[in-house]
Amino acid sequence: MSDSESIAAGYAFTGPALDLGALLWDGACLPDAQIRIPLPMLNRHGLVAGATGTGKTKTLQLIAEQLSAQGVPVFLADVKGDVSGISAPGVTNDKVAGRAAEVKQQWTATGFPAEFYALGGIGHGIPVRATITGFGPVLLSKVLQLNQTQEQSLGLIFHYADTKGLELIDLKDLRAVVTFLTSDEGKPELKNIGGLSTATAGVILRSLTAFEAQGMADFFGEPDFDTSELLRTASDGRGMVSVLELPAVQDKPQLFSTFLMWMLADLFHDLPEVGDADKPKLVFFFDEAHLLFNDASKAFLDSITQTVRLIRSKGVGVFFVTQTPKDVPGDVLAQLGNRVQHALRAFTPDDQKALKATVKTFPNSSYDLEEILTGLGTGEAVVTVLSENGAPTPVAVTRLRAPESLMGPIDAPTLDAAVKSSSLYGRYAQAVDRESAYEKLTTAVPAKPEEAAAKSAPKAPKEDESMVQQVVGSGMFKSLARSVGTQIGREITRSLFGTARRKR
């Protein structure tokens, strides 16, 4: 058996699979040697990498189309604004027809069921928001660019708010709690928290104020997005493609990358164990993945690694999309069983070092990967996946198929019409600002001694009793019990990232 036949045999799966393209060997495309990914292995995670302009987005589109066609919901982060075309049939031309003929593809123009979302409603899409308490202290620290000590201190503030029943819905709620704790009335409470200095609390407050001044308040609040919406299928049985539009927040990379991690953590928190299923419940494409890992603390990276490792058993596959494998920490990279590596550039010494590091992450092969990876054309990639028995397949240089949906964005009026006609629009479009920590702390005023003495009610609070203690003991505070899922006097159960979920 020749080398090319041996490679082709490694992709001859018997069960359902996604078709990526045809094998390239010795400069020729072999249309009968199809390169595929077994459908059940999509929850073993993956990496799509390559330099700018090498076809990563089209690869995501190709995989997403086939997942949807096989009834698997897909989440796509659309950083550049060019993935919305997946909802519309593609347009044939000589280039598309030529590629289809080369790789033995029966190309048919097809649109796929899609929902469009936008962080905080900024841009085109159904607004995606999270409550501060749901987002949690670890992810919020990443967004605020706090150091490890400040992150731990923010965790203590969340613990305080949780145990006192002070709901943190939006940024002004958290700012109100920190402002109170740094005030004269709140200093005794600050001491009782333990390990939180006034100086650190002040730093956190300044970070929150600056963050809010940059227009970040829209991303936090209610109604908070229920990530189970991402698991839906269309009426025809195809998986829904959820597209999160991010062009409007491209200048806030820390925010959108951390929001994507919140979505994953929230899914992890809610989904039951399913083990190895016939097909994934969801495949989640995490674009611009390097932004998540930049300047991340060890605790944060450990949480990412654990989430990626464990979410597989809940039926969710995660594909990280970035330029080179070195953008992803080794412990996370080790969890990514499926690899689609587009061309890399080697113009500088750093580029050459990254190229050599990338080659070392692949199994041994008959190819000269250093030469191959710098010479790949657009829409070509080096592929290795997990076979049906979980073993890595041979490395295969592949000419990829053409997506069947529109390779580019749909126009703005069509996008807006799709958003407003969605059954989810009425549920999430309008922000809600209900009574929470901010209102409790700004409207509660301690009774004056003479007023308290004139009443036959219980004795006035002691002079050293804090405002929060008075609020917690008041009838006004008890109105929090009417809030869905609020647990007064008990700390909210938090997951790996400190995220919390309100019961629905």
Image (cartoon, helix red, strand yellow):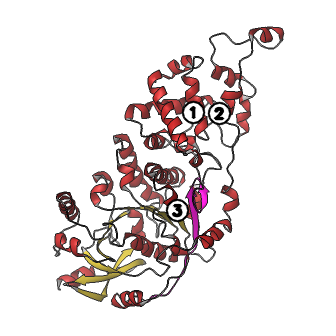
Q: Position of residue 37 (x, y in %)?
A: 37, 74
Q: Earlier in the sequence, mark 3 or mark 2?
A: 3
For residue 339, which quarter of the picture? bottom left
* Stretch in magenta: 106-128
Q: Which is more toward the observer, 356 or 212?
A: 212
| Amino acid type of the residue tagged 1 in the rendering | Arg
Q: CA distance from mark 3 to mark 2?
A: 31 Å
Q: Is residue 103 magenta?
A: no
**Secondary structure of residue under mark 1:** helix
CB atoms of marks 3 and 1 within 8 Å: no
Q: Is residue 274 above or below residue 409?
A: above
Which mark identifies residue 175?
1
Q: Residues within 10 Å of mark 2 (few under 14, many from 20)?
A: many
In the rendered image, which residue does mark 3 sit on?
245
Q: Residues within 10 Å of mark 3 (few under 14, many from 20)?
A: many
Q: CA distance from mark 3 to mark 1?
A: 28 Å
In the rendered image, which residue does mark 2 sit on?
438
| Amino acid type of the residue tagged 3 in the rendering | Glu
Q: Position of residue 174 (x, y in %)?
A: 57, 35
Q: Is residue 196 above or below residue 457?
A: below
Q: Residue at x 17, y 72 (%)?
A: 371
Position of 379 compared to 106: left or right?
A: left
| Amino acid type of the residue tagged 2 in the rendering | Tyr
Q: Is residue 483 above or below residue 184?
A: below
Q: CA distance from mark 2 to mark 1?
A: 8 Å
Q: Earlier in the sequence, mark 3 or mark 1?
A: 1
